[in-house]
Amino acid sequence: MKKILLLAVAAAFPGFVHASGAGTTAASFLKVSMSPRAMAMAGAFGALADDSGAVFVNPAGLAQSDKREVGLGFTSYLQDAKMGNLSYSDTIAENRFGFGASFLNVGGIEKRGLNDNAGLVSALDTFDSNDMALSFAYAKKDFLSGSLAGLDAGCAVKFIRSSIDTRSATAFAADAGAIYHASPKVNLSLAMQNLGTKMKFVDVADPLPFSIAAGALYRAAPNLSLTAELSEYINDDKFYPAFGAEYWLRNAFALRGGYKFGYDTANLGAAVGLSLGFGLKVAGLGVDYAYLPFGDLGNVHRFGFWMQF
């Protein structure tokens, strides 16, 4: 039933509706706004990000590619909740720019009134919940010279809007990130996301899910990338370690997997936090898929398409 949707999603994703730590954050859909490729690696993607999807996790990653690329992803969550994202990256005057858009829609949520004479809470109508974020990013390769040569840096500005029934709220935020190419095999990354204004629907304003993530990439072989990332959600007081891997076969088919710690394994089972997926690319076209199990709540399938030109 759709009336249980918000509770189900809250259990499935860390802090999705309400933070269980220090406080409550708004626009928590931003925590899972990323490409299917990144999700298949449990989100441990900040140091590897080398496609247009970098705009969602670490804007500095846009500098790791010189391709013009457009990406499109979509997901059907529990009880018909839908999420989509669009990304674009390009080079203008030797500088890298990116655009990202994320959307989440939860429809058909039951609206209930006060108790009637029998003590029952009657259903009055239904309403929708919608979230949207637009990001504009800039990145520069070899941002510094000297001892820090090999450091890529990027930043992004973000507009966020959420609506619940007839109420809506907006916020502005900034992202920033860096990737240091320590050696041909090792990247180190640092990213800050969602540092911005609060969102106020009526009287109470809630902060955005501000986070800081430190990551590492080790290229164990030309076709095998191993990643790790530590994410701290400051306002939620939550900490999520994650590990991921990507293995390419003949540079055309990729197998991906990862595990993210911090989910409610007691209620959702040990498999929650696991991510699996694959990627296929041919002549500048690609398809990505990610699978995320959530126990009794069901499974989430994320799909994506991208094109380089």
Image (cartoon, rainbow, N blue to C red):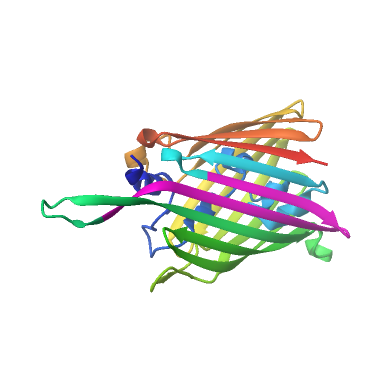
Q: Residue furthest top?
A: 250
Q: How many marks?
A: 0
Residue drawn at (53%, 45%) of the image: 83
Q: Is residue 296 magenta?
A: no
Left or right placement of residue 35 versus residue 263 in this view: right
Q: Position of residue 212 (x, y in %)?
A: 56, 60
Residue 271 to residue 243: above or below: above
Residue 245 to residue 173: above or below: above
Q: Residue furthest right?
A: 93
* Foreground pick, 188 / 272: 272
Q: Is residue 84 magenta?
A: yes
Left or right placement of residue 244 versus residue 82 in this view: right
* Foreground pick, 190 / 112: 112
Q: Position of residue 301 (x, y in %)?
A: 52, 34
Residue drawn at (73%, 50%) of the image: 88
Q: Give the magenta part as a residue range.
A: 83-112
Q: Position of residue 4 (x, y in %)?
A: 33, 44
* Foreground pick, 180 / 299: 299
Residue 222 visible? The answer is no
Q: Position of residue 140 (x, y in %)?
A: 79, 60
Question: Within the image, what quadrant is residue 78 found in?
Answer: top left
Residue 289 to residue 102: above or below: above
Question: Within the image, what quadrant is residue 159 found in?
Answer: bottom right
Residue 168 visible? The answer is yes
Left or right placement of residue 147 versus residue 109 in this view: right
